[in-house]
Amino acid sequence: MSVTLYYGSGSAYAWRVWLALEHKGVPYDLKVLSFSEGDLKTPDYTALNPRQRVPTLVDDGFTVRESAAIMEYVEERWPQAPLFSKDLRERATQRRMIREADDDVGSKVGELFGAVFAPPEKADAAKLADAVNAVKTEVAFWEPQIAGDYVNGGAVSAVDYTLYPHLAIIGRFRLRKPEAIPADLFGPKLAAWMDRMKALPIIQKTWPPHWK
Ligand SMILES: N[C@@H](CCC(=O)N[C@@H](CS)C(=O)NCC(=O)O)C(=O)O
């Protein structure tokens, strides 16, 4: 069996797949691609992922792209250490959360990324404040949904592995522009969940290399 994950440091989408493989204890080869060196644009990588994005998973010659689809593939291919609930309705809720994490959290955090890392000539304080507020409004949706130590209750799931990478990058924004990111951005439950997630050995092991 040969499993290869094409990954890019700092990509929330690639990180969740790395977490899924680690969670399952699947042996894999991690290929770290560099965005700035053009590794995603090479003909070889484009053949695997015509959209030139990470992540891509290759399992014994079978290629899957799109991180949510990869997670579902990993779950079914290696059923040990489940990432999703066995209960139909709980699973539907998990999939809804994953979709919202990608579409709603991911897009708003992406806008904040653009505002925080804008070059000086494009820096726009009002746009930055709007982006912070949009993230604050979005994360408020999650505060009442934290059901226990992890988002769905007592066990870590695909939802935690999806949401955490989208939010962890905000720590990087804080390093770059401490004054722009309010201390109370996350509610108390979400903040405690973030700390719990960060302390997990699996998160430490997969921490984006260029953030260390
Ligand atoms: N919907 C895709 C999104 C993947 C994506 O946007 N990846 C970004 C990194 S976060 C990427 O590879 N961008 C290409 C680039 O920046 O050159 C998925 O879930 O896999």
Image (cartoon, grey):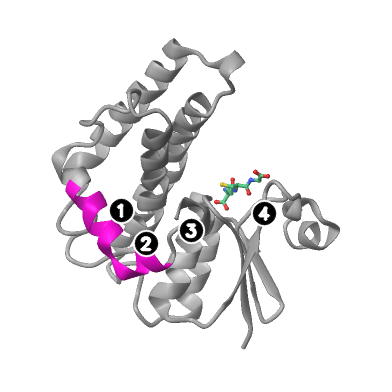
Report crowding for label 2: few under 14, some 14 to 19, many 20 or more residues within 10 A (C-alpha).
many
Which mark's residue is nearer the viewer, 1 or 4? Answer: 4
Looking at the image, residue 36 sits to the left or right of residue 195; the answer is right
> Could you tell me which residue is drawn at 71 percent across and 78 percent down?
61
The residue where tag 1 is placed is: 93
Asked if the residue under mark 1 is in contact with the one under mark 2, i.e. CB atoms within 8 Å, the reply is: no
Looking at the image, residue 57 sits to the left or right of residue 123; the answer is right
Callout 2 amino acid: Ala
Which mark's residue is nearer the viewer, 3 or 2? Answer: 3
Looking at the image, residue 192 sits to the left or right of residue 34; the answer is left
- Picture disc at residue 15: 3
> Could you tell me which residue is drawn at 22 percent across and 57 percent down?
196
**Residue 99 x/y as whole percent:** 43, 47
Does label 3 point to a residue whose CB lies under 8 Å from ligand 1? no
The residue where tag 4 is placed is: 34
Task: Give the magenta-colored segment's residue range.
Answer: 192-205
- Picture disc at residue 158: 2
Q: Earlier in the sequence, mark 3 or mark 2?
A: 3
Q: Earlier in the sequence, mark 2 or mark 1?
A: 1
